[in-house]
Amino acid sequence: MTITDREGDRQREAPLVDAVERFFERPDATFTTPGHKRAPWLTDPLLDLDLPLASGADDAQLSGDYLGEAEQLAAELWSADFCRFSVNGSTHGNEAFSLAVGAPGDRVAVSRNLHKSLFAGLILAGLEPVWLHPEIDPDTGLSVGLSVAEVQRALEQGVRAVMLVEPSYIGVISDLEAIVARAHAAGVPVIVDQAWGSHLGLHSELPRGAMHAGADGMIISAHKTLAAFTQSAILLARGDLLDFQRLNAAFELLNTTSPSAAIAASIDRARRIMATRGEELLAQSLELARRFRRELADIAGLYVLDERITRKFPTANDFDSLKLVLVLAGTGAIGFDVEEDMFEAGVRVELADRDVIVALLTIGDDDASVDRLIAALRRSLERRRAHPRLVSPSTVWSVRPEARMSPRDAFFAPRERVSAERAIGRISAETAAPYPPGIPALAPGELVTAELLDQLRAEAAAGSRVAYCSDPTLDTLLVVR
């Protein structure tokens, strides 16, 4: 949606950006934080960008309400009734929603391809997850969306909310409208972690996004696919199935009392860019994505995910074509080797594992950057080509956890460190997540099985970074005593 779509639109305004610029224009003597005070003998061009919200962009009482005005404009653009800017990423929003939807001991339906931050939210809120398992494409090993029947199964267990990840890390989107309709018929709100889809709903050729599908809450990472600082995210909510006062209290409970005005203003600026130029910029990005797929179509054995996935699987209702997902098994190349070659060529990608490369294409790309990506991929695949192999699905897409304790109880339970072999059959007291994408393969409260441990150790041996566990070699694990 562009600014010309609405009469009397204020979307050209950026109140928080203006407040930041006024601060930089005035040589005030500041006897407040931050300690560097932008003094020329302490700062450099990087530190010169730093300023606080209180006693910086606004006064100590925040009487200008520049942040509030900016949040109202974002709510309008994304069709929400409630909006907050986060300077702690989508992690903040996932945890705030968790605290807002239920009380300790309540059940919530949660997609198993959740980010680790949502699992942290379950621990903080004491919620009991009823896991929703996306369908897996046997040919690629990738997650291809949730079925409505899977959500209905959870609704029948008396859940207080349905918490989804849409789009998935690889850009696939479930039938959100049908899922929302089923949940709303049961009086249950739907919360969507749309961290990877902040651009959705802002161009007619892209999927509509969670709020347009009727979701009650959504968190988007403005830094992932828009033009905002790292750590910036937007929490949005609508309708009457969520208590906005409680949601706001949860947000503030987790919020820093010293928010960066620079990060928040970058969100305001990113929103203005999308409101006024989003259609144009996204049209360019979509054409770049089409060209990328055309120019790699002749590489034997390489499979590049595209909209055909929606015809192959009913659970894949839509697809974000700006996610460039390459399955390498048919080429024989190893993803870690390809990533290494590309890094040496000055090209970095979002994810690499044994079989898959994911490159994120955004409004920040142009013909030159995509040319470099294509050239680096071609050179590496020529160099690394080997005998085709079968896909070895990543643990994070296929895990079926056996929960033995609530996440919160396991987190706070007495724990002990044991060898990996002795951990088999015990209850995990920690998280293990191949990263990226940061999806827990093992989490507090779940049974450690020999199969899961073998999978995780094989991924670590192949080159994956297993994050958030205390011993990344997986020679030992923390388990409930």
Image (tube, rainbow, N blue to C red):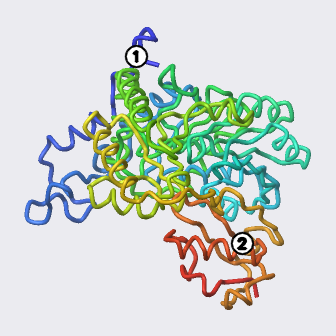
Q: Which of 334 and 22 is in front in this view?
A: 334
Residue corresponding to mark 1:
3
Q: The disc labelled 1 sits on which kind of residue?
A: Ile
Compared with 421, 279 (above or below) is: above
Relative image position of residue 32 (x, y in whole percent):
26, 59
Residue corresponding to mark 2:
452
Q: The disc labelled 2 sits on which kind of residue?
A: Leu
Classify residue 47 by image quadrant: bottom left
Q: Among all residues in the image, which is located at the extreme left?
A: 41
Residue 424 tag number: none
Residue 93 left/right relative to 341: right
Residue pictured at 25% horizontal, 54% vertical? 50
Residue 395 left/right relative to 221: right
Classify residue 17 by image quadrant: top left
Q: Which of 206 and 16 is in front in this view?
A: 206
Relative image position of residue 39 (x, y in whole percent):
12, 60
In this rendering, the count of numbered labels is 2
Q: Which of marks 1 and 2 is nearer the N terminus?
A: 1
Residue pictured at 86% horizontal, 35% vertical? 186
Q: Which of 19 and 166 is in front in this view?
A: 166
CA–CA distance in space, label 1 to label 2: 50 Å
Compared with 240, 418 (above or below) is: below
